[in-house]
């Protein structure tokens, strides 16, 4: 571990995985599940999606204690209809449930040329780009539409209070030369995890990412969490503001459709309803579409066309001479290479919260991690 600046440290990814694995083992997750959670959270940081990375460890532990997510659950296949399937994660960890759902989609797409797979009642699915990458590894184009039941964080265009979730979208295109082309984005201006990272002293939010209860745009995380102590896990229930939808009315419209596809169509449920008497239980719903490239079009032709257009776009004259033009996934590739070499940049307070979580769970020989920090 090395210092980056006064508020940030760099942590080797292997070091983060080891500690986080032990934390979830202490919460009675199987060795496989604990390591899968740790690897996928750390992998999100590697790709630059810190909002879905290791900063979520204390929150995951808190969710387990609230009964919002349970260890060691295998998703149940509840619809089995040829090219169509649906799995119920039963509030199990999304890092594991996501693998089951994607592998189901891959198998069926290879058989039928196309498949549609729903996943309902899942714990936090993490970085949705993971699932698009997994499908692309199998030669499939994939689309993933996600909502968050019980999570009201985003204000609709023209509104100032919370009516939807951050509802991410991911699209994966297999590339001739791996890494693949992956679009992975929240349909809000920022993911809630980015607000959490900013609250802990990490990267600041872009202008207008949040809106307060009076309708004023802001970047102050207090709009989302209220005032909290350094040792507290940020709780969006304590704030009165909201995250804005990206792209004004267009982004707000896409955000709305994520609720229809990821929530209503999968049977997982939308984030909230007008007649609700109480808050809905947190869960991710995901509707995924998989297309076999080789059953649709000549595989070599497809890969050549993808590569040709990608390079055509990259060759655009930059509006900012200090930055190259990038296509979806390029930034993640560059970030991954840097962080594998130099470690994960993490706000000191984020790492301290993770360490405190480990301490509360009596992670064995925690001293070895503390010595590495010092």
Image (cartoon, rainbow, N blue to C red):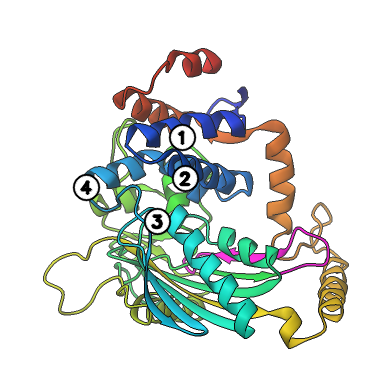
**Dividing the image into 4 quarters, which one contains the N terminus?**
top right
**Viewer-nearest of labels 1 and 3?**
1
**Viewer-nearest of labels 4 and 2?**
2
Circle 2 residue: 37
| Among numbered discs 2 and 3, the one appearing first in the sequence | 2
Circle 4 residue: 66
Q: Is residue 202 magenta?
A: no
**Viewer-nearest of labels 2 and 3?**
2
| Among numbered discs 4 and 2, the one appearing first in the sequence | 2
Residue 91 at what x, y percent from top left?
31, 58
Residue 199 versus residue 23 in the image, above or below = below
Q: Nearer the viewer, residue 43 or 244?
A: 43
Circle 3 residue: 124
Circle 1 residue: 21
| Among numbered discs 1 and 3, the one appearing first in the sequence | 1
Residue 72 versus residue 329 in the image, above or below = above
Spatial CA distance of label 4 from label 2 is 18 Å
- Asked if disc 4 and disc 2 are in contact, CB closer than 8 Å, the reply is no
* Secondary element at tag 2: helix
| Among numbered discs 3 and 4, the one appearing first in the sequence | 4
Q: Quick one: label 3, few (<14), some, or many (20+) residues within 10 Å?
A: many
Q: Quick one: label 4, few (<14), some, or many (20+) residues within 10 Å?
A: few
| Among numbered discs 1 and 2, the one appearing first in the sequence | 1
- Asked if disc 1 and disc 2 are in contact, CB closer than 8 Å, the reply is yes
Q: Quick one: label 1, few (<14), some, or many (20+) residues within 10 Å?
A: many
Could you tell me which residue is drawn at 28 percent across and 62 percent down? 213
Residue 192 visible to the viewer: yes
- Stretch of the chain drawn in magenta: 174-188
* Secondary element at tag 4: helix
Could you tell me which residue is drawn at 72 percent across and 85 percent down? 295
Residue 226 at what x, y percent from top left?
28, 46
| Among numbered discs 4 and 1, the one appearing first in the sequence | 1
């Amino acid at each position: 571990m090395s210092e980056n600046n006064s508020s940030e440290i760099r942590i080797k990814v292997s070091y983060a995985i080891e500690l986080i694995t032990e934390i979830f083992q202490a919460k009675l997750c199987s060795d496989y599940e604990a390591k899968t959670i740790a690897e996928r959270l750390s992998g999100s940081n590697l790709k630059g999606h810190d909002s879905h990375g290791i900063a979520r460890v204390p929150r995951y532990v808190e969710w387990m204690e609230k009964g919002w997510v349970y260890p060691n659950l295998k998703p149940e296949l509840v619809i089995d209809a040829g090219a169509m399937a649906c799995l119920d994660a039963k509030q199990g960890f999304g890092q594991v449930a996501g693998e089951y759902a994607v592998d189901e989609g891959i198998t069926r797409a290879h058989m039928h040329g196309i498949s549609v797979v729903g996943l309902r009642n899942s714990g936090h699915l993490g970085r949705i780009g993971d699932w698009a990458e997994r499908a692309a590894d199998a030669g499939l184009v994939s689309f993933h539409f996600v909502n968050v039941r019980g999570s009201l964080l985003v204000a609709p265009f023209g509104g100032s209070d919370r009516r939807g979730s951050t509802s991410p979208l991911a699209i994966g295109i297999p590339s001739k030369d791996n890494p693949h082309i992956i679009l992975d984005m929240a349909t809000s201006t920022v993911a809630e995890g980015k607000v959490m990272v900013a609250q802990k002293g990490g990267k600041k939010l872009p202008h207008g990412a949040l809106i307060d209860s009076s309708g004023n745009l802001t970047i102050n995380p207090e709009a989302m969490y209220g005032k909290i102590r350094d040792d507290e896990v940020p709780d969006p229930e304590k704030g009165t503001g909201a995250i804005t939808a990206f792209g004004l009315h267009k982004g707000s419209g896409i955000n709305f459709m994520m609720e229809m596809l990821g929530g209503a169509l999968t049977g997982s449920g939308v984030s909230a309803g007008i007649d609700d008497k109480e808050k809905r239980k947190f869960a991710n719903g995901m509707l995924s579409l998989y297309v076999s490239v080789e059953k649709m079009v000549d595989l070599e032709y497809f890969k050549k066309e993808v590569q040709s257009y990608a390079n055509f776009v990259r060759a655009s004259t930059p509006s900012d001479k200090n930055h190259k033009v990038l296509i979806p996934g390029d930034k993640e590739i560059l970030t991954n290479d840097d962080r594998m070499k130099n470690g994960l940049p993490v706000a000191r307070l984020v790492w301290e919260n993770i360490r405190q979580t480990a301490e509360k769970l009596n992670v064995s020989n925690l001293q070895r991690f503390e010595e590495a920090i010092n």
